[in-house]
């Protein structure tokens, strides 16, 4: 709190700045990563211009300027991770002002002036004025703490490069590499004055935790039992939190049914002759949306006070991206035609893979669909996306021989293209009987595509 309060104190001379702070770009966002600055210092900026790209807990979103002016100073550089909401990331000045004379926040001025004394330890006096508060305000990321504790390194020797003095994983690895170089070069350690630093690994860390000998060194082959830590993106962390929340707080119930895709395949061929291209997934989205319209008791969600009926039908479709799974939304799907659903789904999926989804394009869904059929999965169960009540897991198609008893010549064998779908439902909202009726309604709508293919 003390550090944040100093942000608003400025030098006595210069041009008063317009503050640019890390915004909340999604309801669940607590911190963000600066991916790329789209403006450089000295560039003119108009209200609505994009300043930078920010990775939120959902996607990479562009941040727009609220003011006209000139970008005077970038305080948080590209690649910075874990920048908390409200953190000052840049300064602007009004149009016509000299941006080179912008008043720099006092917090930055302090960090610039205290850096040299810490690098010159011969005089014992300066540390008394610049470093006593450092141990009290020592901040480490979980990964950095693990590395320092495992290898017995003193956290106070690491040079913090993270926001507000945070020691990051990279800082810890850099200190580890430096210690390894000193240990592997005894002649240099014997001659160089700062050699005593090389004995720091055996010393117990400031946390008081037990030390362990180094089993592996980054960049070198690991020994049995070692591992490589993979940094988690904001999206991955939020996915992990929401999946854990879903499975631990929502009573999942499951029900499956086989659907005959013969009529859908036949209609797809007819539409293709008219140069109308739609996928099986588009039919599934439409059938699910129409089923929700016909059974509004399933189109609900759980709020803090209990069940809440929804007056909209927005279908969330799961899309796999390099950053993780995200669910863009096809809004008002029950009133859209197949062509419009197909075009919307294709555009949203591409934006999701490019990390260009806007918050309103992935927030507010009422029912989710996850299709793994194209990956060769025959059937599976999906995890509910809270606060929604249901998610439909769609498997691949398979050919099966079945009897057709309605044939006038008697029962005969014929081939059916079957697809298994599994509904995961919130037992607090959709009980087994209601889930069974919904699946029956869905199957009927899917197997009669002409009835639901128009709005």
Image: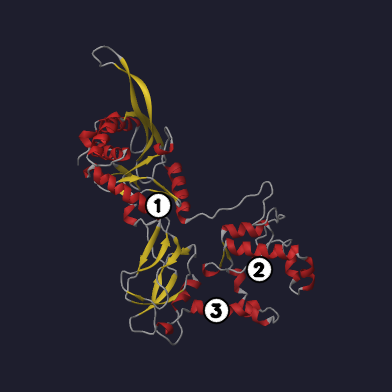
Indicate the position of residue 195 as horizontal and vertical percent values.
75, 70
1 or 2: mark nearer the eye: 1
Decide: marks 2, 3 in contact (CB < 8 A)? no
Q: Residues within 10 Å of mark 1 (few under 14, many from 20)?
A: some
Q: Nearer the viewer, residue 448 or 156?
A: 448
Q: In x, y percent, where is residue 278?
A: 28, 41
Q: Is residue 47 left or right of residue 224?
A: left
Q: CA distance from mark 2 to mark 3?
A: 19 Å
Query: Given this view, does label 3 or label 1 mark the residue nearer the observer?
Result: 1
Residue in the picture at 45% in, 64% down: 34
Give the mark nearest the N terminus, 2 or 3.
3
Query: Which secondary structure, mark 1?
Result: helix
Instruction: State if disc 1 and disc 3 touch (CB < 8 Å).
Output: no
What residue is drawn where x is 50% and y is 76%?
Answer: 107
Residue that badge 3 annotates: 112
What residue would you read off at disc 1? 353
Using the rendered image of the protein, determine whether residue 11 is visible from the camera's viewpoint. yes
Near mark 3 (Cα within 10 A), the count class, few <14, some 14-19 or many ≥20, is: few
Quarter-of-image position of residue 193: bottom right
Q: Residue at x 77, y 70 (%)?
A: 188
Cα separation, mark 1 vs mark 2, equals 41 Å
Near mark 2 (Cα within 10 A), the count class, few <14, some 14-19 or many ≥20, is few
Does dot 2 land on a helix, a strand or a loop?
helix
For this view, does 202 lie left or right of residue 265?
right
Q: Secondary structure at mark 3?
A: helix
Report whether 219 appears left or right of 306: right
Residue that label 2 marks:
157
Residue 68, compared with residue 199, is above or below; it is below
Residue 366 % position (x, y): 31, 45
The number of numbered badges drawn on the structure is: 3
Please tell me which residue is depicted at 47% across the width and 52% down the height of the picture. Answer: 236
């Amino acid at each position: 709190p003390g550090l944040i309060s100093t942000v608003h104190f400025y030098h006595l001379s210069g041009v008063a700045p317009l503050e640019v702070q890390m915004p909340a770009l999604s309801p669940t966002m607590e911190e963000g990563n600066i991916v790329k600055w789209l403006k450089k210092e000295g560039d003119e900026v108009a209200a609505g211009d994009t300043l930078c790209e920010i990775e939120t807990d959902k996607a990479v979103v562009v941040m727009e300027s609220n003011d006209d002016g000139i970008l005077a100073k970038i305080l948080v550089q590209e690649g910075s991770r874990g920048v908390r909401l409200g953190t000052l990331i840049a300064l602007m000045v009004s149009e016509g002002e000299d941006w080179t004379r912008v008043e720099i926040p006092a917090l930055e001025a302090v960090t610039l002036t205290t850096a040299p004394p810490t690098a010159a330890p011969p005089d014992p006096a300066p540390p008394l004025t610049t470093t006593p508060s450092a141990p009290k305000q020592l901040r480490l990321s979980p990964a950095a703490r693990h590395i320092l504790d495992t290898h017995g390194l003193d956290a106070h020797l690491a040079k913090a490069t993270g926001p507000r003095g945070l020691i990051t994983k990279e800082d810890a690895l850099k200190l580890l590499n430096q210690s390894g170089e000193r240990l592997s070069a005894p002649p240099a350690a014997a001659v160089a004055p700062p050699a005593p630093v090389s004995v720091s690994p055996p010393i117990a860390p400031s946390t008081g935790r037990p030390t362990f000998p180094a089993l592996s060194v980054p960049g070198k082959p690991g020994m049995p039992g070692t591992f490589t830590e993979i940094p988690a993106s904001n999206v991955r962390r939020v996915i992990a939190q929401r999946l854990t929340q879903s499975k631990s707080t929502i009573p999942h119930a499951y029900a499956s049914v086989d659907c005959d895709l013969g009529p859908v395949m036949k209609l797809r061929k007819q539409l293709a002759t008219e140069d109308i291209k739609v996928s099986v997934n588009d039919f599934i989205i439409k059938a699910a949306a129409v089923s929700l319209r016909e059974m509004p008791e399933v189109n609900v969600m759980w709020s803090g006070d209990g069940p809440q009926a929804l007056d909209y039908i927005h279908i969330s479709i799961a899309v796999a991206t390099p950053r993780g799974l995200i669910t863009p939304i096809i809004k008002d799907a029950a009133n859209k035609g197949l062509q419009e659903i197909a075009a919307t789904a294709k555009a949203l999926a591409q934006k999701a893979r490019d990390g260009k989804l806007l918050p309103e394009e992935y927030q507010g869904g009422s029912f989710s669909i996850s299709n793994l059929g194209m990956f060769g999965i025959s059937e599976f169960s999906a995890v509910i996306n809270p606060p929604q009540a249901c998610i439909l897991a769609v498997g691949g198609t398979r050919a099966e021989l079945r009897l057709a008893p309605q044939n006038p010549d008697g029962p005969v064998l014929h081939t059916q293209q079957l697809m298994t779908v599994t509904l995961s439902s919130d037992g607090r909202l959709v009980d087994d009987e209601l889930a069974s009726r919904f699946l029956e309604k869905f199957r009927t709508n899917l197997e009669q595509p002409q009835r639901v293919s128009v709005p």
